[in-house]
Structures are given as C-alpha cells and as structure tokens.
Image: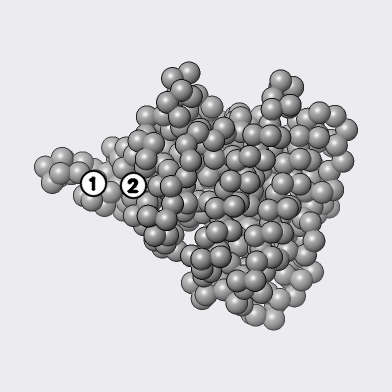
Amino acid sequence: MFPRPLYRLPEGFQMEGHRAPPTLRRIPAHPLSRPRGHSALLPSMLMFGVIVASSGLLLMIERGILAEVKTPPPRGDVAWRTVRPEGEDELELQILRDVRNRTLRRVCGHQSMPHSVWALPPGQRRTLLKHIIVNDKYKFLYCYVPKVACSNWKRVLKVLDGHLDSVDAKLKMDHKSDLVFLADLSAEQIRYRMRHYYKFLFVREPMERLLSAYRNKFGEIREYQQRYGMEIVRRYRKKTAAAASKGDDVTFSEFLQYLLDEDVEKMDEHWMPIYNLCQPCVVPYDYIGSYERLREDANHILEAINAPTYIQFPERQSWYKPVTKETFHYFLCNTPQGLIRELLPKYIMDYSLFAYSLPNITKDHCRQ
C-alpha cells in the first residue's frame, strides 16, 4: 500500500509498558494498576512518540499517500474525556486520552478525508460494515477487532440477545451465527443506527497484536498453517527447505516480511490494521477502549449500554496464552530491526490515532 522508499522511521522510540490483562470481573470503579514509578515518565515519552508518528502521518496525507483510506472528523471528543482523574494514574490516563482526542481531530479533520461511510471506496466500506455488530435490544454498535478480546465480546452480545445462557459457557465460539452485522442491513437502516446507537471498539498495541495473531494462527490453527503458512515458506525459503515444511514452522520474521509485501486491503482480518477494519475517522465512536485496560473499559461499556448487572465480562480462558512483556521483548529483539522499521508505516494510523508509542528496538534496549 505504501511506497517503501518514503519511510525511514527513527530508531529507538520508547514503548509504553505492557502487562498481561488482569483477571476480569465487573467492578463499579475504574482503578488502574500501573506502578507509580512510571507516571512521571510516561507523558513525555508518549507525547514524543505520538507527535513523531502523527507528524509523519500528516505528511503522508499531504502527499496524498493515504488519501484513499481517509474519513471525516469525529463529532467532538470521544468518550475518553468522560473519565475524571483523581490521582496520578488517572491523570496519566487522562493525558493519554487527550493525546488520542487531539490526534483524532487533527488527522480526521484533514480536508482529504471522506465525509461518510458512503464516501469510502467499496472494498473499504464492505470491510467496515462486515466488522460492526449490531445490537438493537440495547441499541449499540460494536466494531470487533480480531486479537483484541473480540471472542469474549461476542459472548457478551449473545448473552444480551438471549442466544447464550452464560458468558462462561464452555463451547467453541461461532463468530457469525446469532450475530447481526451492519453489512446485513439496508443503507437506510445503517444510517439510522450510525446516527442514534452507542458505538465502541477496542484497540491494542499493533505489534503486540501481530505477535498474538502469529502465535495463535501459525502455532495452533491448521487451516492457517495450510492457507498462509505454506505460502509464506514458499515465498521466503529455498525450494528444498520449503518442500519439507507443513506451514507450521513459519518464523516471526517471515510473517512480518509477508505483511510488508502484502496489500493492506487484502490482508486477513487478524492482522489487518485496526484503522482499516473500523475506520475511526468515518465512524464517530462514543468510546474506544484498550486491551491494556480491558477490565476497566469493558465495565465502562457494560454500564454505558445499561447491560443487566448480572452480565460480567468473561474471564480469560484457561487455555489462552497471553503475550507477556518478556515474550514481546524477546520476539521484537530477535527480529531484524530494519524489517520492523519498514513495516511500521503500514500500521502508522493505529500507532498515531490510538496514541501508542513506537516500539523500542535499539541495541541498548534489547541488551537489557
């Protein structure tokens, strides 16, 4: 999608700290558990990384490089502003949300952006409408993003509509049945719901999301090993080595090289950028939650849509293997730095709009 020679991102942006999601249960407040020692450091780090990413993004827009994927300004600040900070951690969170709001307004307000869902190219509009789930009973729209707790959110939606007895039901998730998507509705029905329903989505640090998709799809799912794994080893290995592979031994570097060479609009949804899936400039989301604050933000959504109090966001499945800070560090630091820097522009919208700092892949950091 992007002409590679135009992008050479600086090395060594500090990345915001990551932690595995806590045990999930419904709570009334929104406490944060980040260690206090990071509070003074985060705003400057975060602002620096986002300003650089946003400046590069705006330059791309000015040159028309991203013109085909732009959209209209949101209607005022999204619901990040509704949180009232009462301490250091809350102030840190407010700064993060303010950065996101400002970036959204600045980028989405650019004159090259389309003005509605209907101004999107047909392929992009189709992708968006296929990823927004409709709940008419509680009047909300949820744009699901694979590898950002979307399976558990679908469980919640099925319980809300009476298609599932409990969010903790032990069964394989059917990601299509008993769910209504905007793509299933007429243009008039879509316009009405876009105008009147509560809208939300959840985001995640882009490279961490890619790592989660890689470990799951190529380490566990035979269908993905055969469909994508075999293609990847065929492209990036010598014929003799590729012939011996069953697609289950794809390396993370090979996966990222595949993404670098792939057209963003043709990517599988599990690694397509969140921007392309949910178009946060076109859709005026009322709340954008994050995987890093899954429990707190999920509770906020359940309260906002007036869900029954007995419905709680599901706890993480026992079989799920989270991406820990150590695992993330290991994979990034054992991947060629040049490859990561070349790939980042494809996910620059996610980094910029959602205020994620660019990953630190310097040699000094990786020696730690």
User: Answer yes or no: do the residues labelled 1 and 2 have beta carbons within 8 Å?
Assistant: yes
Is 34 situated left or right of 257 in this image? right
Give SS at disc 2. Answer: helix
Q: At 67% across and 69% down in the image, what residue appears?
A: 72
Q: Which residue lies furthest to the top in this view?
A: 368
Give SS at disc 1. Answer: helix
Q: Name the residue under label 2.
A: 257
Q: How far apart are marks 1 and 2 (CA)?
A: 8 Å
Would residue 270 be seen by someone viewing this image from the given angle?
no
Q: At 37% across and 42% down in the image, what residue appears?
A: 339
Would residue 359 be seen by someone viewing this image from the given angle?
yes
The quadrant of the rendering that contains the N terminus is: bottom left
Callout 1 amino acid: Tyr
Most foreground residue, 75 or 312 = 75
Q: Where is residue 348 in the image (x, y as percent from the top left)?
A: 53, 51
The local crowd at label 1, few if under 14, some if 14 to 19, many if 20 or more residues have their Cα within 10 Å, is some
Most foreground residue, 360 or 90 = 360
Is 139 situated left or right of 103 in this image? right
Q: Position of residue 262 (x, y in %)?
A: 36, 57
- The circle drawn on residue 236 is 1
**Disc with the residue nearer the chain's start (1 vs 2):** 1
